[in-house]
Amino acid sequence: MAAAAFAWVLRPLFARHRRVVLALAAAVPLAAAALYAFLGNVRAVDVGRTVDAATALGTVPAGLLREDLVAALARNPRDARGWVMLARLELDEDRFADAARAFERALAISPKADRDPTLWCEYADALGMAQGGSLAGRPRQIVMQALARDPSHRKALEMAGSGAFDEHDYAAAAHHWRGLLAQLPPGSQEAREVGAAAAHAELLAAAYAPSRGELLYETNCVACHTKEVHWRDRRLVTDWQSLAAQTRRWQRNAGLGWSDEDIDEVARYLNETFYHFPPARQSG
């Protein structure tokens, strides 16, 4: 639980940004109210123009009804800005899967939207919330699309770190968060939070780093047989010496050309993982 908390400590950064943008959009409801007073019907507001103005501010204007926006998009389904507005409206209403689909539409039909790393981050955020709040899997892949468009994008770096952390890729998480930390004001609250998260990820990366024996085994052996083979080989492997001999035979049959040190490292990994022969009986 403590480890997971570090992955989420950064999530409010973008939320705070969106709350600031809401304040910038305060003038939009005033314009809508004036039109309503003149026309007597808020539906008479030009939805397209309202969408344009709101999109420039990055928020959904008060008074814009979902059905109006859906109707406008039915008339003009290639209005990328309209799809972005609908996506953000769905996101604000916690309809995360619908928001993700709307972001996907906008990114697919507009080269300008496709070049915007912030939209890719919002798309990933919606996908992550739709799968319970985790950025593992597809959301992490989407975040990497944002980083491909802007490697220094702060939100993308924060989310890339969170996605990597969710997948237990702690070294990558630390790398992304260190990249974000370099852009934050030294000594700020955000810098302290990001620095603590990066340091924690680095500790986990060191603790869970695979041994050389595991790397050799996972890279060269599991493609040829499943790990269940080690339980079936109990008749051949009865002690440390026979395990080392079988490891030598396995690598020779596979033409791996391992050194004596490599064979010993793999045998040690197999012993610790599957066989559990007394360590005192191991060579070296």
Image: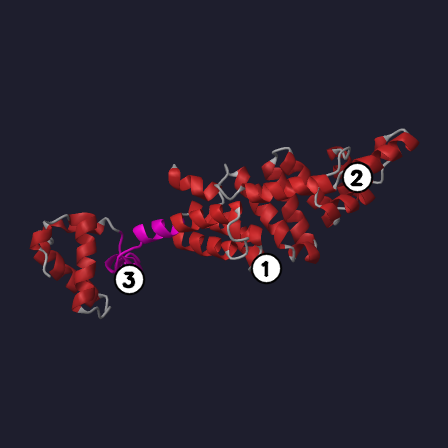
Residue in the picture at 9% in, 60% down: 283
Magenta region includes residue 187: no
* Circle 3 residues within 10 Å: few <14, some 14–19, many ≥20: few
Q: Quadrant of the C terminus?
A: bottom left
Amino acid, disc 2: Val
279 sits to left or right of 201? left
Q: Secondary structure at mark 2?
A: helix
Amino acid, disc 1: Asp
184 sits to left or right of 234? right
Magenta region includes residue 204: yes
Of the image marks 2 and 3, the number of the one nearer the N terminus: 2
Please say if the residues under marks 2 and 1 sit with CB atoms less than 8 Å apart. no
The type of colouring in the image is: secondary structure
37 sits to left or right of 111? right
Amino acid, disc 3: Asn
* Circle 2 residues within 10 Å: few <14, some 14–19, many ≥20: some
Q: Which residue is mark 1?
A: 150
Residue 99 location (% of width, % of height): 63, 40
**Which numbered mark, 1 or 3, is in the foreground of this view?**
1
Q: Using the image as rendered, state which of residue 116 and residue 96 is in the foreground.
A: 116
Inter-mark Cα distance, 2 to 1:
30 Å
* Circle 1 residues within 10 Å: few <14, some 14–19, many ≥20: some
Of the image marks 2 and 1, the number of the one nearer the N terminus: 2
- Boundaries of the magenta span: 201-226
Residue in the picture at 78% in, 41% down: 72
Q: Which residue is mark 2?
A: 28
210 sits to left or right of 266? right
Q: Which residue is mark 3?
A: 220
| Rendering quarter of residue 89 | top right
Residue in the picture at 87% in, 31% down: 36
Q: Is residue 97 visible?
A: yes
